[in-house]
Image (cartoon, rainbow, N blue to C red):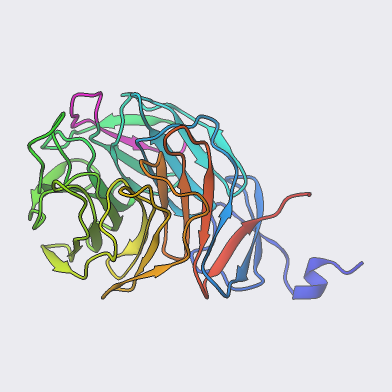
């Protein structure tokens, strides 16, 4: 039998994190997650069933690089539980120090930030994740619940929108995190909560939400200010979200109705694409990119779905089955 090296001309790489730009046919062993992975090209965007959560719950938060590297935490009622997804299954890891629901999130599978949320009193507490445990760091300037977030690591993040306990007020406040403290910057154009958020500290997208009433409004952040851009095709709140910057994002699920609708943002407009397998809202967590995203949990649900965008490179984890 031919070996992988004889077929491909190279050995299987051993890496501590997944390659940022894998090519079709590339195979590697992730020593951090203990998983053998490979990259393949797709022809159509689609959702596929993933491994079930250990503890189903709604109203959490999630963040991560792709559908094989997602961290979810918090949830209703006032959960501290944290779980990591490696492309096959969820593993319970270190709990949040402050149990809460609907916090904001930013960062990666191994370096994340959790901020705000409700206990049910609106919180300003911020915690940083180092792939082993959460550490409480400096709080938000404005305590709020059901806010959105963006950010590439636990040292740079963006927090925006949200609501006070039981609402109002509903907030337009936007804050940036520099690894040590939060700074108030330019407000959102429209106050709202239960909105979607994606991107980084300097290139983010805010979409949907309640203001009150389900919103289709989308705003783009350039590191200095928010600009209103093209609306979602269907206004909704409590949806799942993913995206790498303000030119590429994915919005899915949401209420009303209890929708499985999926929309893709290209920097100018939203386009409806393949629906989720199971319509739901109030996700426990979501994250990834417009090419490789994940949705987990929801009311009375442990279900996980993995999104693969059309024409994208899909990272899959190999199993013995």
Q: Does 72 appear above or below 48?
A: above
Left or right side of 149 for 224: left
Residue at 51% x, 40% y is: 84
Q: Position of residue 195 (x, y in %)?
A: 24, 49
Name which quarter of the figure residue 136 lies in.
Answer: top left
Is residue 126 one of those drawn in magenta? yes
**Quick one: 135 or 230, which is closer to the camera?**
230
**Quick one: 44 or 248, which is closer to the camera?**
44
Residue at 41% x, 51% y is: 287
| Residues rendered magenta in the picture | 118-131
What's the magenta bit mostly, secondary-structure-wise? loop
Residue at 19% x, 47% y is: 210
Query: In which quadrant will I find the N terminus?
Result: bottom right
Count all numbered tags in the image, as a single digit.
Answer: 0
Q: Position of residue 312 (x, y in %)?
A: 52, 71
Q: Does 179 appear above or below 318?
A: above
**Quick one: 290 or 91, which is closer to the camera?**
290
């Amino acid at each position: 039998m031919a070996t992988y090296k004889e077929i491909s001309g190279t050995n299987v790489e051993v890496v501590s994190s997944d390659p940022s730009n894998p090519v079709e046919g590339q195979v590697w062993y992730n020593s951090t997650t203990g998983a053998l992975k490979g990259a393949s090209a797709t022809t159509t965007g689609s959702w596929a069933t993933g491994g079930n959560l250990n503890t189903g719950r709604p109203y959490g938060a999630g963040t991560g690089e792709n559908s094989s590297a997602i961290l979810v935490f918090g949830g209703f009622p006032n959960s501290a539980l944290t779980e990591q997804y490696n492309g096959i299954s969820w593993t319970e890891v270190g709990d949040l120090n402050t149990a809460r629901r609907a916090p904001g999130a930013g960062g990666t599978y191994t370096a994340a930030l959790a901020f705000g949320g409700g206990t049910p009193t609106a919180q300003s507490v911020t915690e940083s994740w180092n792939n082993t445990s959460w550490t409480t760091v400096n709080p938000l300037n404005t305590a709020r619940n059901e806010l959105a977030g963006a950010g590439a690591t636990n040292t740079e993040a963006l927090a925006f929108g949200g609501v006070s306990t039981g609402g109002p007020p509903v907030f337009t406040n936007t804050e940036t995190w520099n690894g040590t403290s939060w700074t108030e910057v330019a407000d959102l154009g429209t106050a709202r909560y239960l909105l979607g958020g994606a991107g980084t500290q300097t290139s983010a997208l805010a979409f949907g939400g309640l203001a009150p009433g389900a919103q289709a409004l989308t705003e783009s952040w350039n590191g200095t200010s928010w600009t209103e851009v093209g609306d979602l095709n269907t206004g909704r709140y409590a949806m799942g979200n993913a995206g790498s910057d303000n030119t590429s994002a994915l919005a899915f699920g949401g209420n009303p109705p209890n929708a499985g609708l999926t929309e893709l943002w290209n920097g100018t407009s939203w386009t409806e694409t393949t629906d989720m397998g199971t319509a739901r809202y109030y996700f426990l967590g979501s994250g990834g990119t417009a090419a490789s995203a994940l949705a987990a949990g929801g009311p009375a649900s442990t279900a996980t779905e993995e999104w693969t965008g059309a024409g994208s490179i899909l990272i899959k984890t190999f199993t013995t089955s």
